[in-house]
């Protein structure tokens, strides 16, 4: 027996989520349809609203409902420091650690040649324009300590070599292979405080 086409489409749509395979997607679909129709409707509305209202901040590239996100619009933050992270979740965890007073730039990914993701796919051109605005004096690289994160950090350091911009990397208080989103706040704060220069 075949599933109705609309059920197959729902299962297929749920499989786009990271870590969700065919069986998990099928369980989610059945749960939403059988036991939580209100939750399914809420999810559909929230997803539709997010797709309609969210854009990328013009300065930091994170998700925002306005041309400038609330952090970039905050004149109390240090304008001369720019912390580069891979994803919006990394920005959020740094903010929770309350260890950085500057502004951010979100790459929305990381360089990964094995996955066909190169420098042009992670907004390095936008980062270059942002850093060379005449205000930024230090770039703090806070990419993850994975192989891809290290390649990305190296490429960013090379971009600003001999351009008069100080480039630092958060310290290795972070576990090797670790991702910012899953690190405790104390370790993350220490890593930011003990960042080191890359373009000496």
Image (cartoon, rainbow, N blue to C red):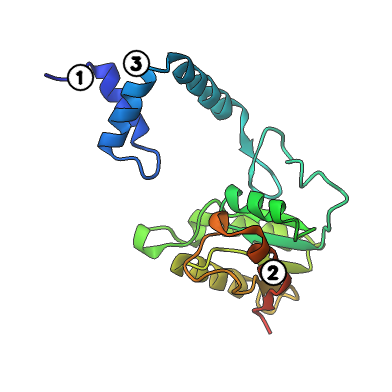
Left or right of 149 on screen, residue 21 = left
Residue 120, which numbered label? none
Name the residue: 82% across, 58% down.
79
Circle nearer the N terminus (2, 3): 3
Q: Which residue is mark 1?
A: 3
Tell which tag, 1 or 2, sits nearer the viewer: 2
Relative depth, front residue between 150 and 176: 176
Residue 152: where, in percent of width, then height? 52, 66
Q: Which residue is mark 2?
A: 190
Circle nearer the N terminus (1, 2): 1
Relative depth, front residue between 110 and 33: 33
Relative depth, front residue between 163 and 77: 77
Tell which tag, 3 or 1, sits nearer the viewer: 3
Describe the element under mark 2 as helix, strand or loop: helix
Name the residue: 70% across, 74% down.
194
Question: Within the image, what quadrant is residue 162 found in?
Answer: bottom right
Q: Residues within 10 Å of mark 1 (few under 14, many from 20)?
A: few
Q: Residues within 10 Å of mark 2 (few under 14, many from 20)?
A: some
Left or right of 112 on screen, residue 120 = right
* Circle 1/circle 2 CB separation < 8 Å: no
Residue 83: where, in percent of width, then height? 69, 61
With respect to residue 28, does 186 lie above or below?
below
Cα–Cα gap, marks 2 and 3 = 47 Å
With respect to residue 103, does 42 lie above or below?
above
């Amino acid at each position: 027996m075949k599933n109705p086409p609309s059920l197959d489409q729902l299962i297929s749509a749920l499989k786009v989520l990271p870590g969700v395979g065919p069986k998990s997607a099928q369980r989610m679909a059945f749960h939403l349809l059988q036991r939580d129709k209100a939750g399914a409707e809420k999810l559909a509305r929230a997803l539709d609203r997010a797709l309609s209202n969210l854009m990328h901040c013009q300065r930091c590239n994170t998700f925002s409902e306005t041309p400038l996100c609330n952090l970039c619009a905050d004149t109390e933050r240090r304008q001369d420091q720019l912390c580069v992270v891979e994803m919006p979740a990394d920005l959020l965890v740094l903010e929770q650690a309350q260890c950085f007073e500057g502004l951010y730039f979100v790459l929305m990914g990381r360089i990964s040649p094995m996955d066909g993701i190169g420098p042009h796919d992670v907004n390095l051109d936008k980062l270059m324009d942002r850093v060379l605005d005449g205000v930024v004096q230090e770039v703090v690289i806070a990419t993850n300590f994975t192989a891809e994160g290290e390649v990305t950090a190296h490429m960013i350091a090379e971009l600003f070599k001999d351009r008069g911009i100080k480039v630092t990397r958060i310290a290795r208080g972070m576990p090797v292979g670790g991702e910012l989103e899953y690190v405790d706040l104390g370790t993350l704060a220490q890593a930011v405080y003990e960042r080191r220069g890359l373009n000496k």
